[in-house]
Image: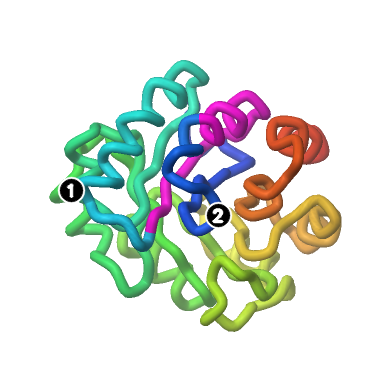
Amino acid sequence: MKRIQDARLYGIVDLGYVTPEKVEHMTAQLCAGGVDVLQLRAKKLTASEIERLARLMLPITRDHGVPLVINDHLEVAAAVGSEGVHVGQDDDAVAKARAVVASACFVGKSTHSLAQAVAAQAEGADYIGFGPLYATGTKPDYVPIGLHEIAEVHRLVTLPIFCIGGVNASRLDEITAAGAQRVVVVSAFLLATNVSGEVRALKQRMM
């Protein structure tokens, strides 16, 4: 199983783009392409529905050695024994997450500024998401933070930092040139004609 510290490319099975019926297929395609870590994000589904999908994903992710992260739902992460859980700024604190999930489960936190990134590290998160870099349909209510703070957040925070928000193949060079070492890709993968091929091509550029 890959460690979060060794992950460079983070994928998300987002039910805003993927129907529940296609979750297994999408999981297999993303893993085959080479994502290093994969999150299940389903903002509008019930906890029981999310647990059912997570249990379908786990055999696939584990077969590929890819950690599965559950977004928001601590109890689901604990119930299925996922490798990770992710919380947002408005969700539960890292300490509460650790109290709910097993000690082997790593905890990530979304951050949208340098101050939030530093606070998440102090709070004990195992990694952070930093963004959104660009305007994105996934998080339309969030103001993009741009690329200018990427280098500074890497100076201030020693945790794995996954830059997120509008990341795609055409923007990858400017994102990495700004100092990003790890990225999250959502719609550019999920809406691709050839999902595994898109993942593979982008990952090769990050080697």
What residue does disc 2 label? Answer: 17
Q: Nearer the viewer, residue 139 or 102?
A: 139
- Residue 6, image x and y in percent? 56, 34
Q: Quadrant of the N terminus?
A: top left
- Residue 110, image x and y in percent? 44, 64
Check disc 2 and report its element: helix, strand or loop.
loop
- Label 2 crowd bin: few (<14), some (14–19), many (20+), radius 10 Å: few
- Residue 65, image x and y in percent? 48, 21
What residue does disc 1 label? Answer: 75
Q: Is residue 68 left or right of residue 5?
A: left
Q: Is residue 144 left or right of residue 41?
A: right
Q: As displayed, is residue 100 above or below residue 31?
A: below
In the image, farthest residue toward the left: 99
Q: As displayed, is residue 80 above or below residue 118?
A: above
Tell me the magenta residue range. Answer: 25-42
Mark sitting earlier along the chain (1/2): 2
Check disc 1 and report its element: helix, strand or loop.
helix
- Label 1 crowd bin: few (<14), some (14–19), many (20+), radius 10 Å: some
Q: Is residue 178 left or right of residue 80?
A: right
Q: Does the magenta stretch include residue 111?
A: no
| Pointers 1 and 2 in contact (C-beta within 8 Å) | no
Q: Quadrant of residue 202?
A: top right
Q: Which residue is drawn at 15% across and 48% down?
A: 100
Q: Does the magenta stretch include residue 41?
A: yes
- Residue 150, image x and y in percent? 67, 66
